[in-house]
Image (spheres, coloured by chain):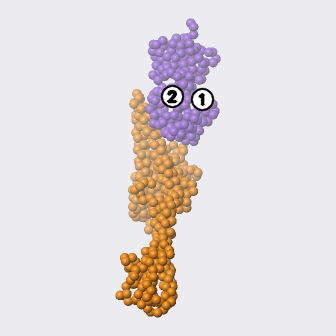
């Protein structure tokens, strides 16, 4: 899952980025409000972690403006402002969660996963489709109850497809899900990972829609 | 109002009632004396007149052989009056209640005029006189008690309504005082009803002019406390806010280090954890300095050489400047005496120099000058750093105000500390663009040392 981290404090930003990566997220880190707004408008992040005391443009203003522009991704506000009116304002302006510093990294990751799940209409922790069950927190995939070993990229790809089960995702969309900045994406990377997934899970699990992209149907197609 | 405390109501009541009673009593005593005097004169006049009548009556040929005549009693009050007429020592005429012996003992010798005597255990006022001829003696007496009872009746007439009026008056005064003190009671109730934290001004509608100074003083006090509490509250809130970020950073980095399998990445996270600790420690140090400064009374100031203090601080900061390849120079006049407190001055100078170094890029210049002109000592610290926008200059020194985009971790507390220490010393702080170096110039000027 690819998320945007907006935090102006160098030490904290560095720590959060490293910690969220350990938890299996792809993290892009911006340090001011203007950059945060630009990225939120341009890139398809699964979620964002937004500090409020950002230079150049305050986090609340960023949030208000991107919400006004129709950006719907889940936003977790991470801030030192603990006054109740601040929290209320934050949530009212469009935050999906409001977390006070300091925060436990695992809790932060869990909240982000929950936000993303809910944003895709999936209230349970496990993603389910066909005979697959994917647990984002444990990074475990079960097929018909049996664990399947997947690489990081394969897992992320499967997670993106399962989150959007029943919908077609283009190759570009999948690439954006898989890679944060600074990663050179080979032109056929998505095809390669899809190929590996089909080999491990069975060829019918992921379907190709020619000229459009890939689709993971909710129900197993009749053989 | 509690019973043990002296009650204003009771005091006023007592005072007013006491005064009224005293005035009445005085009036009554005066009336008593006046009335008695007038009464005596009037009744004495009547006695004398009656005696004159009796004398006139005796002018007819007195019959020495006639028996003494007892005059009839014509009025119920008549027995209080008695008279006797003696002719050549023999009783010629008397009232029924008069004794046969002269009312005034003849042994005392006969003198004309008024006399108070005891006759048969009763006090009489007696007027004695001669007839036209010396052998007729006339006595007219009146019971003293009857005079007194008239006097009492008179006095009773005037005092009784007063005695009745006094309790009524007390009630009226009590009510008036109660009404008069209503604004005070209202103030008390208003104060009692307030939330303990409420600090808005007390408003008592219709408060009398006498209460206004008290209300004003009270409201001024509330305002002072309010300001103090607000600044205290803001300080704690700001401090908590400012401490959260470094602590969050420490926590995140430590957690990353714990979970990191890669040695290099773990070292990086641990280094960052240490950095975070240093930063939090510095912040705490600054907060403590500031709160101590704000709580402290004016410290004892002594004459000392500012140049010496600045030299020490610059020497101490030089390694930090060298590390960042910054050029730190000092130009200090030999002896610059100011009245000051040495430790505080060191903190002030260190904060200024530290700020200049911290917010200027590597290879920047930082120039420290101590000069004296007309007895006034000035310390200036200027740098070739990015400076501060004109609009933001006045906000320097607000707690936790930071210049955005400075890229440096900081709390803005250093500035507050500088301002506060300068204030304690009666020194003025100014910040402006440095003409020579292009960055920020801060000058602190002490008043001429007395």
Find the distance from the CA under tag 1 to the CA under tag 2: 15 Å
Q: Nearer the viewer, residue A124 or B209?
A: B209
Secondary structure type for disc 2: helix
Outermost residue to the front: B65
Outermost residue to the top: A223
Q: Nearer the viewer, residue B185 or B398?
A: B185
Image chain in purple: A
Outermost residue to the bottom: B133
First of labels 1, 2 by sequence position: 1
Of the chain colours in the picture, the one used for chain B is orange
Q: Tell me the residue that label 2 is attached to.
A: A112
Locate the C terminus of chain B and report the quarter of the image it occupies.
bottom left
Q: Measured from the top left, where is residue B85 in percent x and y?
A: 44, 85
Residue A184 visible in rendering: no
Q: Tell me the residue that label 1 is attached to.
A: A72
Above or below, A112 relative to B110: above
Secondary structure type for disc 1: loop
Residue that appears at 54% across and 25% down? A118
Callout 1: few (<14), some (14-19), or many (20+) C-alpha neighbours within 10 Å? some
Q: Measured from the top left, where is residue B414 in percent x and y?
A: 46, 50
Residue A96 visible in rendering: yes
Above or below, A100 relative to B116: above
Residue that appears at 46% across and 13% down? A145
Parent chain of label 2: A
Callout 2: few (<14), some (14-19), or many (20+) C-alpha neighbours within 10 Å? many
Above or below, B416 relative to B74: above
Locate the N terminus of chain B and report the quarter of the image it occupies.
bottom left
């Amino acid at each position: 899952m690819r998320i945007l981290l907006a935090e102006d404090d160098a030490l904290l930003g560095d720590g959060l980025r490293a910690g969220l990566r350990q938890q299996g997220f792809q993290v892009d880190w911006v340090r001011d409000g203007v950059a945060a707004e630009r990225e939120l408008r341009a890139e398809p992040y699964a979620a964002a972690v937004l500090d409020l005391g950002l230079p150049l443009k305050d986090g609340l203003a960023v949030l208000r403006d991107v919400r006004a522009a129709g950006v719907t991704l889940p936003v977790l506000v991470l801030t030192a402002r603990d006054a109740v009116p601040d929290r209320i304002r934050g949530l009212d302006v469009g935050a999906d969660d409001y977390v006070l510093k300091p925060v436990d990294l695992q809790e932060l990751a869990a909240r982000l996963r929950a936000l993303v799940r809910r944003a895709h209409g999936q209230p349970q922790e496990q993603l389910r489709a066909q005979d697959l069950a994917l647990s984002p927190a444990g990074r475990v995939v079960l097929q018909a109850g049996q664990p399947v070993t997947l690489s990081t990229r394969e897992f992320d790809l499967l997670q993106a497809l399962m989150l959007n089960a029943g919908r077609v995702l283009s190759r570009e969309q999948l690439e954006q899900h898989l890679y944060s900045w600074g990663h050179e994406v080979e032109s056929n990377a998505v095809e390669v990972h899809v190929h590996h997934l089909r080999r491990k899970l069975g060829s019918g699990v992921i379907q190709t829609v020619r000229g459009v992209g890939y689709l993971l149907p909710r129900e197993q197609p009749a053989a | 109002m509690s019973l043990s405390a002296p009650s204003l109501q009771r005091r006023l009541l007592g005072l007013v009632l006491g005064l009224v009673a005293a005035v009445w009593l005085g009036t009554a005593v005066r009336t008593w004396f006046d009335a008695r005097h007038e009464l005596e004169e009037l009744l004495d006049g009547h006695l004398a007149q009656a005696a004159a009548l009796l004398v006139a009556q005796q002018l007819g040929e007195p019959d020495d052989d006639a028996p003494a005549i007892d005059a009839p009693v014509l009025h119920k009050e008549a027995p209080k009056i008695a008279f006797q007429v003696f002719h050549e020592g023999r009783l010629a005429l008397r009232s029924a209640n008069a004794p046969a012996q002269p009312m005034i003992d003849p042994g005392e010798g006969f003198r004309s005029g008024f006399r108070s005597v005891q006759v048969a255990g009763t006090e009489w006022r007696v007027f004695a006189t001669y007839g036209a001829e010396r052998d007729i003696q006339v006595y007219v007496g009146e019971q003293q008690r009857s005079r007194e009872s008239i006097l009492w009746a008179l006095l009773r007439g005037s005092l009784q309504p007063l005695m009745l009026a006094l309790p009524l008056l007390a009630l009226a005064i009590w009510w008036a005082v109660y009404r008069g003190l209503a604004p005070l009671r209202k103030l008390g109730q208003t104060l009692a009803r307030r939330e303990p934290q409420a600090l808005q001004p007390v408003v008592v509608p219709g408060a009398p002019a006498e209460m206004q100074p008290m209300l004003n003083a009270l409201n001024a006090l509330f305002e002072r406390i309010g300001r103090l509490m607000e600044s205290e509250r803001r300080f704690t809130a700001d401090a908590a806010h400012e401490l959260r970020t470094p602590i969050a950073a420490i926590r995140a980095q430590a957690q990353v280090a714990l979970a990191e399998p890669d040695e290099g990445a773990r070292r990086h996270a641990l280094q960052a954890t240490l950095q975070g600790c240093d930063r939090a420690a510095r912040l705490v140090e600054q907060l403590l300095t500031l709160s101590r400064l704000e709580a402290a009374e004016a410290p004892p100031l002594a004459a000392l050489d500012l140049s010496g203090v600045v030299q020490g601080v610059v020497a101490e900061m030089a390694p930090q400047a060298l590390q960042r390849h910054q050029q730190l120079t000092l130009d200090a006049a030999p002896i610059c005496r100011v009245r000051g407190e040495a430790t505080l001055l060191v903190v002030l100078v260190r904060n200024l120099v530290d700020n200049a170094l911290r917010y200027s890029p590597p290879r920047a210049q930082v120039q420290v000058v101590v000069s004296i002109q007309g007895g006034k000592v000035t310390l200036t610290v200027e740098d070739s750093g990015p400076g501060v926008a004109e609009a933001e200059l006045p906000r320097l020194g607000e707690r936790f105000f930071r210049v955005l985009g400075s890229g440096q971790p900081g709390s803005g507390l250093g500035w507050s500390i500088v301002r506060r220490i300068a204030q304690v010393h009666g020194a003025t702080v100014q910040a402006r663009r440095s003409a020579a170096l292009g960055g920020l110039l801060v000058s602190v000027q002490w008043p001429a040392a007395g």
